[in-house]
Image (spheres, rainbow, N blue to C red):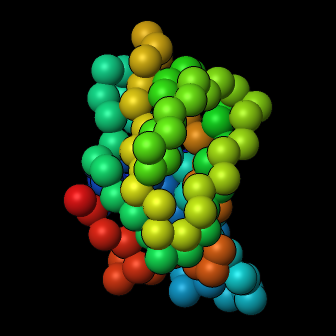
Amino acid sequence: MQNCEEFVAGDNAILRELLHPDKENIKLLYSLAHAIVKPGETSYRHKLKNSEVYYILEGEGMMYIDNEAAKVCPDQAIYIPPNSVQCIKNTGQGDLKFLCIVVPAWRPEDEEVL
């Protein structure tokens, strides 16, 4: 993962794209990224045209999808339906780290930051 370039995504989370069909020499139907939200921070409200899954690796937080909110913790998977307004808040003392799986693969034009 260290050889993947880190950048701040449109939703303000720190991302590293681990697998993406546009960057790999393999056929993929999805993209996989590692995300970090710092303590006390919340990703920007945004929505994707595609479905997404977050898999929580470390930390704790609150996940907001449309009009619902739920606590999140390690080893939890969260399904985010297409076109749902979403954001995640880090409510813990350390980094909130999670994987983002987007099907079909994430493209900038498929994301809208609100």
Of all residues, the one furthest to the top in this rendering is 93
Q: Which residue is rendered at x = 59% and y = 41% of the image?
A: 98
Of all residues, the one furthest to the left in this rendering is 114
Please tell me which residue lies in front, 55 or 2.
55
Q: Which residue is rendered at x = 50% and y = 25% of the image?
A: 61
Q: Is residue 5 left or right of residue 20?
A: left
Tell me where residue 44 appears, x and y as whole percent: 29, 48
Kindly indicate the quadrant of the structure image that contains residue 110: bottom left
Please tell me which residue lies in front, 32 or 18.
32
Q: Which residue is rendered at x = 57% and y = 24% of the image?
A: 71
Tell me where residue 39 appears, x and y as whole percent: 36, 21
Vertical placement of residue 48 versus 33, above or below: below
Vertical placement of residue 114 versus 50, above or below: above
In this rendering, the count of numbered labels is 0
Vertical placement of residue 113 versus 66, above or below: below
Can residue 24 be seen here?
A: no
Tell me where residue 59 appears, x and y as whole percent: 56, 22
Q: Is residue 82 left or right of residue 109?
A: right
Q: If the image is split into quadrants, where does the C terminus sit?
A: bottom left
Kindly indicate the quadrant of the structure image that contains residue 89: top left
Vertical placement of residue 91 versus 5, above or below: above
Of all residues, the one furthest to the front in this rendering is 67
Q: Is residue 3 left or right of residue 9?
A: right
Can residue 13 be seen here?
A: yes
Q: Which residue is rendered at x = 69% and y = 26% of the image?
A: 74
